Amino acid sequence: MVRALVAIILLLAVSSCFDEGECLITNTNIMKVSLRLKETGELVSVTFDSVSIPHTDSVYYINQNVQGLGLPVNPGVTEMSYVLAYGGINSGIKDTVSFAYTNQSVVLAPHCGAFPFQKNLVVVKYTTFGLDSVAVTNQTLLRDVVENVRIYF
């Protein structure tokens, strides 16, 4: 009897969190990048030695072959750079891509609190030792967005 009562209370507590549809969080701090062929625009697999964020200990995609990247953005700053190392450790191809964005706190409803959104994403600069070009396809970082950036090789 006690277990059933506890289960009912927990069920009510959990379901009450989802009563408010306006409190659903749609933002993300992950920039979604697809890797594409310059000539055709088709997805291409690239083997990265690593993808890192300068001046931090953050290293991602170590020795991974991928067609896309999920790169974190820091809501505490308005510009991020990423070093893409690929082509095998001996070849040492490294390109740096820098992005700028606007941080905006959005209050979805008074009882929800504020959530940080990143929008107005733009390419600030990039090197072309191995990659050809970089293009922003969606300027707002949202969970349901499939792609924010295309990097062409």
Image: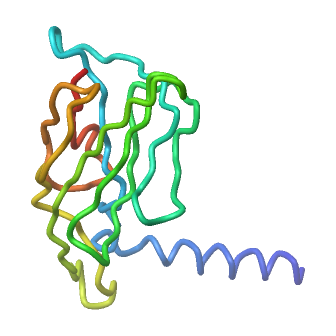
> Which residue is at the front of the view, 15 or 145?
145
Q: Is residue 13 left or right of residue 46?
A: right
Residue under the point 45% across and 22% down:
87
> Which residue is at the front of the view, 12 or 45?
45
Q: What residue occupies the far bottom of the structure in this picture?
A: 110
Where 34 sits versus 23, above or below?
Answer: above
Expressed as whole percent of the image width and height from the top left, the position of residue 106 reads 20, 78
Q: Determine which quarter of the picture holds residue 80.
A: bottom left
Expressed as whole percent of the image width and height from the top left, the position of residue 45 reads 41, 18
Expressed as whole percent of the image width and height from the top left, the position of residue 147 reads 25, 38
Q: How is the image coloured?
A: rainbow
Where 104 sits versus 70, above or below?
Answer: below
* The C terminus lies in quadrant: top left
Residue under the point 52% across and 46% down:
60
Where 19 sits versus 111, above or below?
Answer: above
Q: Determine which quarter of the picture holds residue 145.
A: top left
Where 73 sits versus 48, above or below?
Answer: below
Q: Is residue 117 left or right of residue 7?
A: left
Expressed as whole percent of the image width and height from the top left, the position of residue 92 reads 45, 30
Residue under the point 24% across and 69% down:
117
Q: Is residue 121 left or right of residue 86?
A: left
> Which residue is at the front of the view, 58 or 106?
58
Residue under the point 13% across and 37% down:
135
